[in-house]
Image (cartoon, helix red, strand yellow):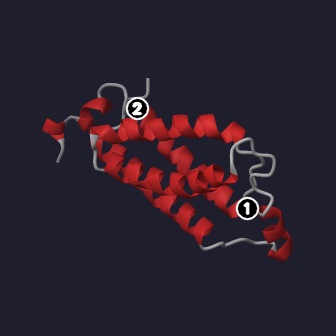
Amino acid sequence: MIPFPSKPVFRGLSLAAVVLQVIAMLSWICDWTFGGEAANTALQWSSYGSILPYAIVYWWGQAYPILFSIGLLFFFLFHGWSRIFLLSLLVISLILTPLSGLSVSDALSSFLYSLANLVFWLPFLLSFFSPCSEYFNKTQNG
């Protein structure tokens, strides 16, 4: 059986998730899109056919990566509330995504966000089970 990660390994995985999330967010914000004019035109189709008003889709798309990065940072620092904060963000995203219409993204951003999510999910899921959940106890923070 594979043992649970120690606190330093857990913190390392969390730090890798934070770094990858920030890099992915920067690639999205700085518009590092490959493919020229055709790719930029295709990206404008995002949220076509949305059931939700455009303002909700737009602002959630802007706020989610920022809030998620903040939650990851506090997760890295072992704040207990960060687990619930990240879980609530994921639940809201699961509810809003099917109602948000067409989702269009470039390959680099998709790859970086997928990589960040891959690294994030292991410590996040383990954080709800003992002994990893004990890393978030206030008396053991350090």
Q: What residue does disc 1 label? A: 106
Q: Quadrant of residue 134?
A: top left
Res 19 quadrant in image:
bottom left
The residue pinned by badge 2 equals 126
Task: Tell me where residue 108 appears, x and y as whole percent.
Answer: 68, 63
Task: Give the Cα separation between the discs numbered 1 and 2.
Answer: 31 Å
Residue 135 in the figure: left or right of residue 54: left
Kind of residue at disc 1: Asp
Q: Nearer the viewer, residue 55 or 75?
A: 55
Name the residue at the bottom extreme: 36
Q: Position of residue 50 (x, y in %)?
A: 75, 45
Q: Residue at x 30, y 31 (%)?
A: 133
Q: Residue furthest right?
A: 38
Is label 1 or label 2 in front? 1
Image location of residue 33, percent across then percent down: 72, 71
Of the 4 image quadrants, the one containing the N terminus is top left
Which of 129 and 1 lies nearest the eye of the viewer?
Answer: 129
The residue drawn where x is 61% and y is 34% is: 95
Measuring from the top left, give residue 79's x and y in whole percent.
Answer: 27, 43
Q: Residue at x 50, y 47 (%)?
A: 119
Determine the secondary structure under disc 2.
Answer: helix
- Say if 81 sits above or below 1 in the image: below
The residue that appears at 32% across and 32% down in the rendered structure is: 132
Checking the image for residue 50, the label placed there is: none
Question: Is residue 38 placed above or below 80 in the rendered structure?
Answer: below
Give whichever of discs 1 and 2 has the lower sequence position. Answer: 1
**Disc 1: CA contacts within 10 A as few (<14), some (14-19) or many (>=20):** some
Q: Residues within 10 Å of mark 2 (few under 14, many from 20)?
A: some
The reply to whether residue 122 is visible in this rendering is no
Question: Is residue 101 left or right of 17 when viewed as pictured?
Answer: right
